Amino acid sequence: MAKARRGSLSSRHEALRYFHQLSATLPRKLVQTEAIMVRRGSPSQGLFSKDNVIGERGYGVVYQGKLINGSPVAVKKFLRCVYAASLTNTIVSPDAEDKPRRNLEWKLRLLDYWSCAAQELSQTSRKFINMDDEIVSETPVQASGSVDSGKKSNVWRFFKKIGKDRDGIEKAEYNFCHHEYKIGKNPKTKNAYGTSHLSRHIVSCKSIPLNIRFDDDIEGLPTKIDQNVHRKKLAQAIAKHDLAFSFVEYEGIRDWINYISPTIIMPSRNTLVSDLQMIYSTEKEKLRQKMSRIPNRICLTSDVWTASTTEGYICLTAHFVDENWRLVSKILNFCQTIPPHTGTDMEAVLFNSLKQWGIDKKVFSITLDNASANDNMQNILKTLLCKQNSLLYDGEYFHVRCSAHILNLIVQEGLKVAAGALFKIRESVKYVKASDGRKMKFKDCVQQAEIEEGVGLKSDVPTRWNSTYMILESAIKFEKAFDILSVVDGAYKDCPTNEEWSLAKKMCEFLEPFNETTNLISGSSYPTSNLYFMQVWKIECLLEDNQTCDDVVIMNMAFRMKMKFDKYWKDYSTVLAFGAILDPRLKLKFLRFCYKKLDPSTFELKANEVLEKFKRLYGEYINTFGGSTISQSSNQSPMSPEEGRLTKKSKMVMKEFREFDCETQTFKDKDELEIYLKEGLIHTNEDDLKYDVLNFWKISEDRFPTLSVMARDVLSIPITTVVSESAFSIGGRVLTKYRSSTLHEHVQMLICIRSWLREFVPNHDDDEIGEIHEEEVSTATMHLPQHS
């Protein structure tokens, strides 16, 4: 090293303060705030305890609570520079090529306090020495300005100024032990006290805050706080809980975080957006890789939504069974669509999304509502995918209509019969909820009628039939209270008559099975395609039976609803009937049973027609996955230790025996279906939701390798668009009148991250696993446009 000339600096501490002050002129990525370089046995060793250095060789470079490990050569050069800085006022500038190569979190809180040594520096010319010990240049260092240095120091995170004492000397108090120290200037000598004594107290004080935890195995070292992990979890929380980007800049939030741990650095909103973009890119690539690895195809749902800002968004969701046989539902895109929302425009958006995700040749089906634009869109998309041979069976089973929408249309048609009674009940509920005074008066009526208070009155959305059922169910309970209210409140004019209340009770009883079916088929965490056939058959039987009901109103309701049923469900969806066949509790026998109940003369014909179509689709899978045999993976087993000790001749005998065993017990892929259908049904006492049909195919994958792939595709078909519509509930919280200026790409980023970080767990109710509240799920379930 070139001989360093001594300056007027009196202590090593002052040299380090100068070094910190000039760090702003060094490469930004290399020196961010303060830098202290240490090694065991170095001149700087006295500033640190023995355990303050991480690394097997005892070398390290510390940045504000982090120790950077580099190559021994690079670190030695840093140490020589520090040694020079401790002897002279010559300031050291490390070379950019000697940057440390990796970061380790430093478990030492005292190093975070060294920035308190930063002092205002007057304009001087100081020499810079590079790693090769050559004088490179002389650069004037600008003063940091006239801002009070005390306010810039990190020491003031732990001290507060308490004013002057009797002698006129300003004092500062430590926040935890309340020890007082002199600060500012001595009124007599005019010398500054500085802040070094404050930083030394921080290091030595044993009044550790309660919010600083300590490792059990390392005495005196706080639990490490990885700033990168902190920022990542913060960004994830922002996305999960629909918080604004400015949340991280709220003064109260920053004060709270600073109280928890002063070493935590809160990012700015721009840094937060960058972190979210990084998470978005990372999670998107994970999902893309996940979809590329699975052998099965991917089912889609899509819907269009108009935000409170009057902007249109289209949501595309993927549904598939992953490698662990879990049903996965993830939002792929939530992008803005420019009017008009024609079928051609929506097709272009969806096809472009499929291309970006690399799944345009792995699509099995798409579930849509009954809007005419959707019909046009799926026709164009199906034609385009068929031209590139991307669909099975020429796309015959590509389009699936949303069962929840169809059921909504069927029930709405029946509700028209009792429109008068429904109108009075709705108006009665609206009247009571219009003001606090009316609510209090109605509460008195409830107590007078001696009605137990439980679930109160529920509001109704006329376009959602299940909310109509809920308002009927809640209002019937308060029939007597409404009668009393009509007597005590002269302004209440829409009280239903006794006949209308009786009609409401009959309607509520009649609609109860429809409500159960709606809740069952609207699940998203479990397969629903195997439930379709049974639920639709139950509805048809219910309507058939009530067409001969003695009650004229119920009979008329059933008649009108049956007409709407025949329009959409006269011919059951074939591909969803396949779901019943692939349910080991049902299989083809259940189809024959249901068809026979409806029409004994044609049940065999209908069941055989479904079976023939099932076989043709199954043949497509055989052509795709080849003619492998079942026994290859299930019958072979590892060689036992005893077999390992057999002679060569004996091993040959055992090999021939295995081949003989395979020939007598195996069958070709084309026989998988026959064997599966001939096996007996699985009888369980579990209800529809608790039985895990995917688990059956998981444990049967070795016996039915090709049929299990087909089961993956069919059982992952969503029979409703609930997941896409639930995304609109999230979008309603992301885009509000207070956050209407959020960029479109940021809206998609937030909603997609929320979906990707959320995992569905099989065999649990959605309201227990989702982050959407039960009320919002119910809303999203029937957030449906009306189509005739």
Image (cartoon, helix red, strand yellow):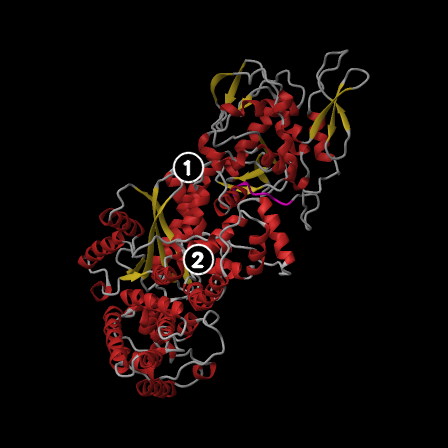
Query: For residue 104, what is the image quadrant?
Result: top right
The residue closer to the viewer here, 617 or 706, is 617
Q: From the viewer's perspective, is 235 left or right of 584? A: right
Q: Position of residue 391 (x, y in %)?
A: 23, 62
User: As rendered, which of 713 and 305 lies closer to the eye?
Assistant: 305
Residue type highlighted by circle 1: Thr
Res 422 label = 2
The residue most toward the right is: 166
Query: In the picture shown, does residue 695 fall above or below 648?
Result: above
Q: Amino acid at mark 2?
A: Leu
Q: Of discs 2 and 1, which sits in the foreground?
A: 2
Determine crowd level at label 1: few under 14, some 14-19, many 20+ residues with C-alpha closer than 10 A.
some
Residue 194, image x, y percentages:
69, 21
Name the residue that disc number 1 marks. 742
Residue in the picture at 66% in, 28% down:
156
The answer to whether the residues at label 2 and label 1 have Cβ atoms under 8 Å apart is no
Residue 362 % position (x, y)? 28, 59
Residue 224 is inside the magenta segment:
yes
Q: Taking 268 as reference, is 472 above or below it? A: below
Rate crowding at label 2 as few (under 14), some (14 to 19) or many (20 or more) other CA atoms within 10 Å: many
Image: magenta residue range: 223-228
Q: Residue at x 72, y 14 (%)?
A: 191
Q: Which badge, 2 or 1, is on the more N-terminal residue?
A: 2
Give above or below for 214 relative to 90: below
